[in-house]
Image: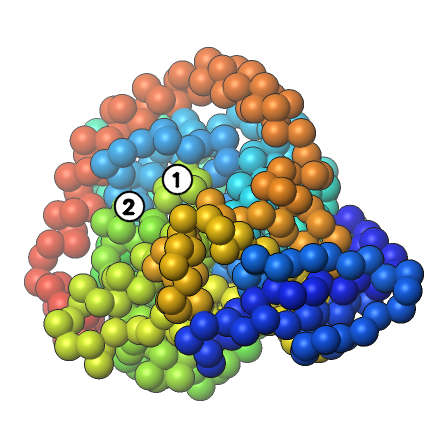
Amino acid sequence: MAKNEPGITLIRGARIADAGLRRAEAGDVLIENGVIRAVGTDLTAPAHATIVDAAGMLIHPGLINGHTHGHGGLARGQGDKWTLELLLAAAPWIGGNRALADKKLATQIVAAEMVLKGCTAAYDLYSELPLPTVEGMDAVAEAYAGIGMRAVIAPMVADRTVYEAIPGLHDALPESLQKDVARLGLPAWQQTLSAMETVLKGWSWASHDIRYAIAPTIPHHCSDDFLCGCAKMAKTHGLAVHSHVGESKVQAITGIKRYGKTLLAHMDAMGLVGPRFTAAHAVWLDDDDMRLAADRGASLVHNPGSNMRLGNGMFPLRRALDLGVNVGLGTDGANCSDNQNMYEAMRYASMLSKVQTPDPRGWASVEECYRAATAGSARALGFEDIGAIAPGMKADIVFLSLRHVNWIPHNGTVNQIVHAEDGNAVRHVMIGGRFVVRDGELLTLDLGKLAEEAEAARERLEALNAGYLDLYNRLEPIVASFCPGMAAGPYQVRRYLCDAVG
């Protein structure tokens, strides 16, 4: 992350979002060297302090994206009626043949959108094939640092393709397609672990608040030896672990068929589930899984946009909170949820909790959705000093214009942040006391140049990946038939799994 501006800043006269108040009250925020020193009214500051007049503005802590994919930045809008499994089948087409510059460019697109829409930190599960490299992961970190965001970057890795991971899918392919997908095979798990160790040894971004983690992508896409290797690496080096767990019904069924237990229970048996573990999506976790996550101090990250977009189902937010799990909030990648708008993620989280039952007692409150997008995600990322406007916290602050139509009238602050705000009222964004967005303009990156580079990359990659598109078109009808058929079966309700094994 870029260095903070030196000295002292006083934000004067802003309304400060507070989940405990219906309407935010006016106050001041004193910042010294990027850290909040005081919050109150009529604060004084030295004569040389920079004064930010925030009258007519609402401020809230920077939103935190608990789950995204920087590699998705160049793949926005590639598909429509995609299940998760079709998205995985499309991966070589929408993500293949990336040059080093493309890896940075894709991440810049994602980071620029996030910060312009009030998000100041993100957990990025970045896919670099066939193996994560020092140069590739540095390019991703450079993208976040250049824009000014905080991030946790986790190489997303596996040693089984989707065709090897889902029971029966490979055999359902005709022989010609079996040969084609065999060429997509992944390196041995020992090579991947070695590559991740090499990246870790050269990691130089911690001082920028850009941290390194590991992401065995989906449990059954990883052999048990690989999962155990990831657990050992995480324990040895004190690394966080992030995985997609119970995202789709196909995943949930596969876990039972392959392991005789749920995916989360299997990951726990491999030594992965603990306070630094995050399970993304968690749509198909049962109560025992959630109690396990709570008991281990693990986090779940709800991604309502992509869960709907890919037809995966509805995460039981109210139930997870009632069982004591820390829940963060994410957008998922731009290749499967189309945008990186955390305001939209909050709104979707609220709405999805409401359509699961007609009883309002089963709904999540706007305060809980807001907390998930701030403190909940901060905990998932492993940051203790972001996610709130309070003394001792880093000054990651979003300024919303109360003169924007989203805030006319201003009846309920957190309610309107969750249900009415869409990013259009964002006026300024400060990270570590330094403005990265001012008057709606991104200060740290030339968006015009970014657009030109993205269009050139899109055109080049479209030509390079034409063969992968042809392969996807031949795979699509089979995957689109096999996986929903597998999910239909006798597995009809959430609390079914172990009883459904024949």
Label 2 with label 1: CB-CB less than 8 Å = yes
Q: Is residue 462 left or right of residue 479?
A: right
Residue 368 coordinates in the image, percent (x, y)? 40, 74
Residue in the image at 15% along x and 71% along y: 357
The answer to whether residue 295 is above or below residue 131 is: below
Q: Residue at x 34, y 84 (%)?
A: 323
Number of marks in the rendered image:
2
Q: Please provide percent x and percent y for residue 113.
A: 53, 41
Q: Residue 416 lies in what quarter of the image?
A: bottom left
Q: Amino acid at mark 2?
A: Arg
Q: Answer yes or no: is residue 151 visible.
A: no
Mark 1 crowdedness (10 Å alpha carbons): few <14, some 14-19, many ≥20: many
Left or right of 488 on screen, residue 273:
right
Separation of residues labelled 2 and 1 (CA atoms):
9 Å
The mark that comes first in sequence, 2 or 1, is 2
Instruction: Decide: few, some or many residues near mark 2? Use Cα within 10 Å; few <14, some 14-19, many ≥20.
Output: some
Q: Is residue 76 left or right of residue 130?
A: left
- Please identify the quadrant where the C terminus is shown: bottom left
Residue 481 on image: x %, y % = 15, 39
Q: Which residue is mark 1?
A: 338
Q: 138 or 393, which lies in front?
A: 393
